[in-house]
Image (cartoon, rainbow, N blue to C red):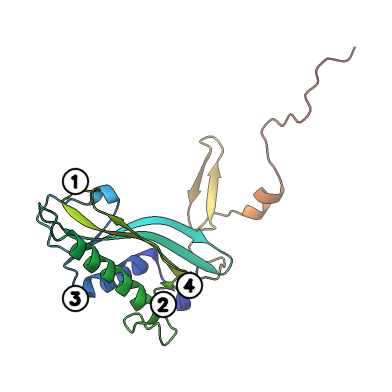
Amino acid sequence: MILKEISSSYNNIIDALKCVCISHGMVHTVSSGNADDIDINSNVVYPLVHIVPSSVSAGVQQITVSFNVLAMDLVKTDESNEQQVLSDTMQILIDVIAQYKNGLMLSVQQNTGIYGQADDISYTLEPFTERFDNVVAGWNMSFNIVMPATYFACSNFNDSATYDAAENTWTFINGGDIDCSNSSSTPVEDEPVVFPDKQTPA
């Protein structure tokens, strides 16, 4: 579990990232989900930023949540505006990084950053121009958000339960009793056979 005073949930993290993106003056739509969820044929108002969850790394004193953030805009049929689209969408992602590094929206300058701060690394932006059948172009950025984290046992675990041997199930109730320390230190087997005899002595 993470200390509430210095951290937040996954919902907080992604909602804060969406808020920063939609607050950008050039962005009209923000969405999240798998990359396959991007529907370029719908009535989306561009430029669009789409956030794809990638991974979570639970470190010793911090949790790092990784995303792929795609910024894209429509490209004309003759591709005459492709360079401008790439320029604008790159600037959007650079500005998102800057907001997490030095901006006021997330209280980063006051070092409170309850919704995480950008990982202190160099970010790589990769362009795409043909990924969506030449309809849109833009950039894909791997973006890491880091939260301080302290692990401790908390009330999220229900330590009251009863075991039904016939059904081989646990039922969690207020009046039950369970001690996981016994299970972790004392193996229990119905019919333990550690070193089976290969032959019966005479």
**Among the two numbered marks 3 and 2 on one chain, the one whose residue lies closer to the N terminus:** 3
Q: Is 183 displayed left or right of 94 in the figure?
A: right
Q: Which residue is mark 3?
A: 25
- At 12% from the left and 49% from the top, the residue drawn is 41
Q: Is there any visible trace of residue 18 in the rendered image?
A: no
- Give the Cα distance between marks 3 and 2: 24 Å
Task: Check disc 1 and report the residue beneath it.
Answer: 133
Q: Earlier in the sequence, mark 4 or mark 2?
A: 2
User: Which residue is at the front of the view, 138 or 55?
Assistant: 138
Instruction: For label 3, count other residues whose C-alpha is less than 10 Å away and answer few (under 14), some (14-19) or many (20+).
Output: few
Residue 126: where, in percent of width, then height? Answer: 34, 58
- Are the residues tagged 4 and 2 within 8 Å (C-beta)? no
In the displayed structure, 190 sits above or below 196; it is below
Q: Considering only order in the chain, which callout, 4 or 3, is on the residue closer to the N terminus?
A: 3
- Of the two numbered discs 1 and 4 in the rendering, the one whose residue sits closer to the viewer: 1
Identify the residue at the far right of this view: 202
Gap between marks 3 and 4 measured at Cα = 25 Å
Select label 1 or label 3 by which is in front. 1
